[in-house]
Image: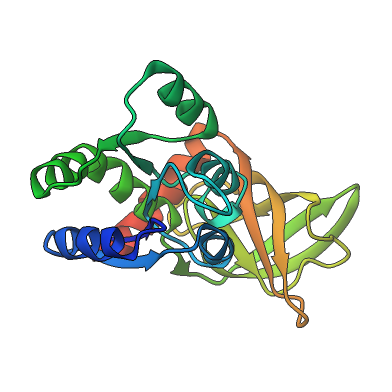
Amino acid sequence: MKILVVDDEAEICRMVKTMVEALGVEVHTSSDSREAALILEREKFDGVMLDVAMPGLDGFQLARRIRSTPPNRQAPIIMMTGMDDVETMRRAFEAGVTLFIGKPISRERVYAIFRAARGAMLAERRRSARLPYRTGVNCVCEEQRFNSTSINISEGGMALESSGPAKVGEVVSLEFSLPDARQPIRVTGKIRGKDPSGRTSIEFTETTEASRALIRDYVYGKITE
């Protein structure tokens, strides 16, 4: 797993990094919350640990940014705080925080919070795991139909060679096949990114439970082979 630790005190970042790495987790750190927000916009993490009181963006503001950032919108957020009052927790949960770890940080507290968060972090890692997969995809965007070819697929989305006339932010309906699936998979997604060559990243926004299960079983089965 890979996490990002954000605290304006560099010593706290180093201490948490040492403790968490002992659990076999890859840890990145940032002492600048604005820099962290930019990192989170372009890089996927399985979880984020952040402080409450920071210059630039405080913990509540950064949590809201994370929840609006496609790569990490569903990643568990652990807030490090010495404040345990009801108002702080209310604001944190409203901003999207998942769990709290009290300060001063200790090895026992770190290990306990990771035992609590590990399942959610692993689920997020599996959800975003991209498996190379090529198949024809029938697409519809605002009643315009076009064909494309997939590059990879995950439980949460897929990449296409092109998205025709569709633009970033638009909703597109997709139909494609999976090995051993008796019927085509039909999902709705939103275009999250498109590079100059036309390659497009799509986040699934609506799927039936049956289609989600077929995608999940195919991706996880291949990853664990």
- Which of the 4 image quarters holds residue 37? bottom right
Residue 50 x, y percent position in the rendering: 39, 49
Observer-nearest residue: 183 or 74? Answer: 74
Q: Specify how the rendered protein is coloured.
A: rainbow
- Which of the 4 image quarters holds residue 64? top right
- Which of the 4 image quarters holds residue 34? bottom right
> In the displayed image of the protein, which residue is found farthest to the left?
108
Observer-nearest residue: 154 or 215? Answer: 154
Residue 20, compared with residue 57, is above or below; it is: below
Q: Is residue 84 left or right of residue 15?
A: right
Q: Residue at x 53, y 66 (%)?
A: 39
Observer-nearest residue: 112 or 217? Answer: 112
- For the N terminus, give its image quadrant: bottom left
Observer-nearest residue: 125 or 146? Answer: 125
Q: Is residue 76 left or right of residue 171?
A: left
Q: Is residue 147 left or right of residue 221?
A: right
Q: Residue at x 45, y 44 (%)?
A: 53
Residue 11, compared with residue 182, is above or below; it is: below
Q: Residue at x 69, y 58 (%)?
A: 192
Q: Residue at x 59, y 47 (%)?
A: 65
Residue 125, compared with residue 148, is above or below; it is: above
Number of numbered labels in the structure image = 0
- For the C terminus, give its image quadrant: bottom left
> In the displayed image of the protein, which residue is found farthest to the bottom?
197
Residue 187 x, y percent position in the rendering: 64, 44
Residue 31 x, y percent position in the rendering: 42, 64
Residue 51 x, y percent position in the rendering: 39, 47
